[in-house]
Image: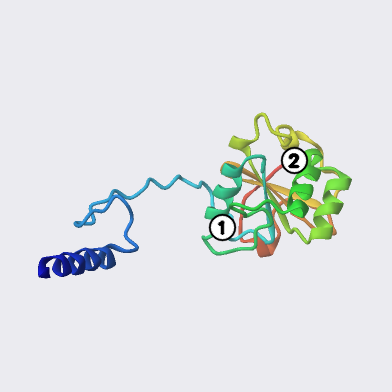
Amino acid sequence: PAWVAAAAVTVLSLGIATEGRSLPFDPFDDQAMPEVPDLGTSTADVPAPQLHLPATTPEHNRAYQLASTEGFYDLVNGRASTNPSTVLDLIDAMATFPDAASVQRLQQWGVRTVVIHTALVPGTPQATAVERPIAGLPLRRYELPGLVLYEVSSNASSGPSERSGAGGRSGPD
């Protein structure tokens, strides 16, 4: 019968027209936009590659990866679904940061800045990192709102490097 062919064409046409649409189908495109979390202070002008800590949960790393899209700076631990063992080993080595062994590991990786998100550190290996001394280490420590940054270099001094453009407040050694 002719009506079967017409029905089949109609169903196929609707299938083709709606292919690729998000479900549930909304012909008026009234879907609410998801709420985007506040990512806090930007680190786009801070020397890269950067390592953001703590990095103990996928949520941390996904937030850092999302934040890195402002300027698309190089990020060591910006990952979504995969967990490369080399990156996991580096993050595990940061449990004692800042100390000579962890800083040496950062230098081997070519990390220029370690960014510690102070609101996220309670209960993580970095909970006391900002209180640890850096005297004698090739680090510069300074603060931006909600962050403590450590620039990894060959000469220890206080405050951001001139190239960082961060202009943060210098912290004590």
Give the side of residue 66 with respect to residue 77, left or right.
left
Residue 45 location in percent, x, y?
A: 59, 61
Q: Is residue 11 above or below residue 23?
A: below
Q: CA distance from mark 2 to mark 1?
A: 28 Å
Find the residue positioned furthest to the top.
123
Residue that label 1 marks: 68
Residue 157 location in percent, x, y?
A: 79, 52
Image quadrant holding the N terminus, namely: bottom left
Which residue lies at the image location 23% right of the left edge and 53% below the top edge?
26
55 and 20: which is toward the camera: 20
- Residue type, label 2: Pro
Image quadrant holding the C terminus, namely: top right
Q: Secondary structure at mark 2?
A: loop
Give the side of residue 145 with respect to residue 103, left or right.
left
Q: Secondary structure at mark 1?
A: loop
Residue 76 numbered mark, or none:
none
Colour mapping used in the image: rainbow
Residue that label 2 marks: 172
- Residue 59, quarter of picture: top right
20 and 125: which is toward the camera: 20
Q: How many marks?
A: 2
98 and 64: which is toward the camera: 64
Give the side of residue 102 with respect to residue 164, left or right.
right
Which of marks 1 and 2 precedes in the sequence?
1
Q: Is residue 117 above or below residue 154?
A: above
Residue 99 location in percent, x, y?
A: 85, 43
